[in-house]
Image (tube, rainbow, N blue to C red):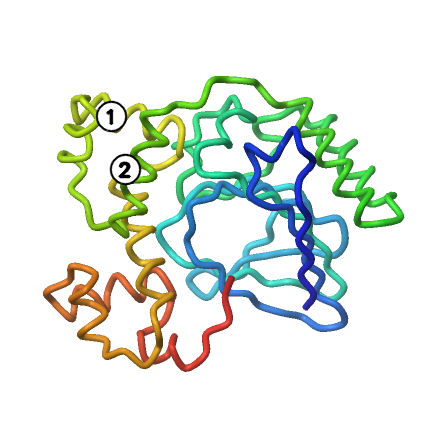
Amino acid sequence: MTIAEYKPTEILQPFIKAIIIIESGGEQLQNRVLPNTSVALAFCFNGQNSYTENSSLNILPKTTVSGLRKSVRLINYSKKTSTLIVLFKENSAAAFFKEPLYELFEKSISLDNIEHPNEIRMIEEMLCEAKTDIRRVKVVEQFLIKKLNYTREDNIVSAAITKIKQSKGLIRIQDLALDLHMSNDAFEKRFRKVIGSSPKQFASIIRMSSIIHQKSNERFLDIAFEAGYYDQAHFNKDFKLFTGQTPTEFYRGASFW
């Protein structure tokens, strides 16, 4: 597998974290995709992608938009599969989609469910016909620029994201709303609209992401305690939901991104 990352054009840099092209080469591959805080847009322009869930294989659409998730997803790449993936910044995907982002939580849907199918087919054809990956990146950038709906950044949601990250997800949402001078209900509604998950779900992703990036030689009990867990069984359950593995299995050398 080869992974190449491209910096988005200047006009898209405030909104897009990265543009990535993944190529499987001459072998079938499975990738463990852990939950993260980015809505993702994927264009498969060669081969076929699928995901494994409950031991069954599910084919992914050629062009897929995926919301935030609380659980791991196993992505399968057939031989000679090439996929361009756009990772949006946390508070930016709403500027490109009319669909409420919270309706995408835990879902991956065909982009032509929310955009005109003829337009999506045209983009797919242009990606297949492009001679270079640089050209493919440009095709997708032009599509996104056309879809971009300039809106002022929601400073309250941005401040909430910063506070959640600073606390590594260990923050009471009621206290966060109070600190931002909002009622809990109003804050949650605003957050879900911009981010695509509830503040609690977002904090849980940040919390577990912080855990898995700690050194693997730390004792699991210490890791759990530092992350606010006082019950080893609860920690193990959340960890397996997030990674698909026990802590012991994961730290042996999980393959993920």
| Rendered image quadrant of residue 117 | top right
Q: Is residue 166 above or below residue 9?
A: below
Q: Which residue is mark 1?
A: 187
The amino acid beneath tag 1 is Phe
Residue 64: horizontal and vertical position, in percent? 59, 42
Crowding around mark 1 (Cα neighbors within 10 Å: few <14, some 14 to 19, many 20+) is many
**Left or right: 204, with 150 as reference point:** left
Q: Nearer the viewer, residue 68 or 110?
A: 68
Kind of element beneath mark 1: helix
Residue with the mark numbered 2 = 199
Query: What type is the residue that disc 2 sits on?
Result: Pro
Describe the element under mark 2 as helix, strand or loop. helix
Label 1 and label 2: CA atoms lie apart by 9 Å
Whole-percent x and y of residue 158?
37, 31
Q: Classify 47 as above or below 18.
A: below
| Residues at discs 1 and 2 in contact (Cβ within 8 Å) | yes
